[in-house]
Image: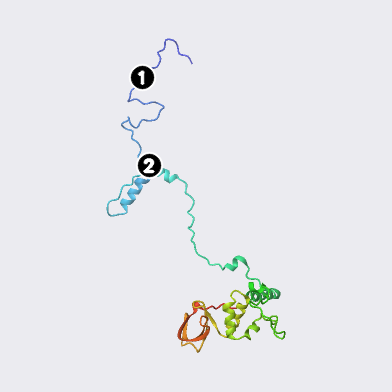
Amino acid sequence: MTLPPGSPSPSYSEGKPGQSLLNGPHSYSQGEGIKAPELSSLKSMAERAALGSGLDGDIPSLHLTDRDLFSSSTAPPGPPAAPQATLSEVSIPPSLGVCPLGPVPLSKDQLYQQAMQESAWTHMPHPSDSERIRQYLMRNPCPTLPFHHQVPPPHSDSVEFYQRLSTETLFFIFYYLEGTKAQYLAAKALKKQSWRFHTKYMMWFQRHEEPKTITHEFEQGTYIYFDYEKWGQRKKEGFTFEYRYLEDRDLQ
């Protein structure tokens, strides 16, 4: 469509503020008879409900905008909160960690092997068991008659042989053959005669009579002890034998 050359061109600066477009939206700010519609909001409904319920006191105003109300009303509901798990302690026997189905009964052969291992543990070998029997060498050799013993008697390294010796001989072997198998056998023979070694005084003690006082830590009474300095047996009355100084190892 073309306009004739003589027609005036429209002017856009001649518009008046009171006029409105024919096909455009109505202006609510300029028109006197047209007002913005009052939109009902959740805020006004909540205020009316609070006033109608008859609550006493001042009701704080809800500082919410229409944007906050509509955004909260149209938001999709979130997933339900998961229930909070409660913790508890459970006691499990350690044996179930190794055998969840319970202990397996041992066979007859396994029980026999276990019994043999326990008995072997109670009879452990000592370093002195591997020592050779040393030949006796006299410090001051002298010629002897042929009907005297020229070599040590047989089975002289057994406990039975040492039990046939006198008590003074056993004390001599214990104090003068230190660190040998003979000292070990002499101590074992002395223990079989109810002698007990005191680790503080380094002497052997024996009960002369039943102790008058016996506790878990000591016993008190009359004792016979061997004095290695004066080389003789002495009696001590009212002696307190503390168990912490008792050499109570089982000599096997």
| Residue 112 seen anywhere in this rendered image of the structure | yes
In the image shown, does 105 or 4 lie closer to the viewer?
A: 105
Q: Position of residue 177 (x, y in %)?
A: 60, 76
According to the picture, the residue beneath numbered tag 2 turns out to be 66
According to the picture, the residue beneath numbered tag 1 turns out to be 13
The furthest residue to the right: 146
Residue at the location (57% across, 84% down)? 168
| Side of 44 where 209 appears, left or right | right
Quadrant of residue 194 within the rendered picture: bottom right
Q: What quarter of the picture does the C terminus occupy?
A: bottom right
Residue at the location (59% across, 83% down)? 169
Crowding at label 2, few (<14), some or many (≥20) Cα neighbours within 10 Å? few
In the picture shown, does residue 7 fall above or below 152?
above
Q: Secondary structure at mark 2?
A: helix
Q: Secondary structure at mark 1?
A: helix
Q: Amino acid at mark 2?
A: Asp
Q: Position of residue 121 (x, y in %)?
A: 63, 74
Give the CA distance from mark 2 to mark 1.
Answer: 38 Å
In the image shown, does 81 or 91 lie closer to the viewer?
A: 91
Q: How many marks are shown on the rendered structure?
A: 2
Residue at the location (34% across, 51% down)? 49
Which labelled disc corresponds to residue 36? none
Q: Amino acid at mark 1?
A: Ser
Q: Position of residue 160 (x, y in %)?
A: 65, 84
Crowding at label 1, few (<14), some or many (≥20) Cα neighbours within 10 Å? few
| Side of 113 where 206 appears, left or right | left
The furthest residue to the front: 143
